[in-house]
Image: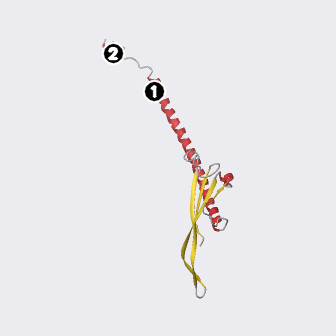
Amino acid sequence: MRSMHLRHRVRPQRGVGVVAAMFVLVVLSVLGAAIARLGWTQQISSAQDMEGARAQRAANSGAEWGLYQALRGSWTSCNGATQTLTAMKADLGMIVTVTCNHDSYVEGQTGAGDPPVFSDRTIKVYRIDAVACNAAASCPDATRVGSVGYIERRRQVQASDQ
């Protein structure tokens, strides 16, 4: 009698398998979404790294162009001179804004002749600022700073005419 009494008290469990299957499906769905998100983030990061390298090359080229203009070209008195270079838009997808400023300093004296006649030696120090970005019109583009996909790199150089 006792065994019959226990048999009636213990009831078979039903529906546990369905709950476990639902739990496994939810966990796998969350894991799949996380993997997809990670892949997307890595793809965006890789594209921005490549764009950053292109922007750095464009900024370096703009700085070299600005140095040439200041030392050998048309910017011999370049205070505040600015030029936007759009030729790299086709190759690199970047435009570069180059700005030039200079300061003149008197450094020592030079003498020539017999007896020597001394005169002040003036040196110009040029500061070239090249900003490359993937904007449509000019760099830097204040409206796009901080947005996804906007890339900007800056190169600043100094050189003297002596």
Q: Amino acid at mark 1?
A: Ala
Q: Residue at x 53, y 41 (%)?
A: 38
* Classed neighbour count for the residue bearing mark 2: other residues with Cα under 10 Å, few (<14), some (14–19), many (≥20): few
Answer with left or right where residue 74 lies relative to residue 8.
right
**Rendered image quadrant of residue 107:** bottom right
Query: Where 74 sits versus 118, above or below?
Result: above
Q: Amino acid at mark 2?
A: Leu
Instruction: Tell me the CA gap for discs 2 and 1.
Output: 28 Å
Residue 20 marker: 1
Residue 122 horizontal/vertical position (percent): 57, 73
Name the quadrant of the C terminus. bottom right
Mark 2 lies on residue: 6
User: Can the viewer see residue 57 in this picture?
Assistant: no
Query: Where 81 sits versus 90, above or below?
Result: below
**Rendered image quadrant of residue 127:** bottom right
Q: Nearer the viewer, residue 42 or 81?
A: 81
Residue 149 horizontal/vertical position (percent): 59, 46
Q: Residue at x 57, y 72 (%)?
A: 123
Residue 129 horizontal/vertical position (percent): 58, 59
Name the quadrant of the N terminus. top left
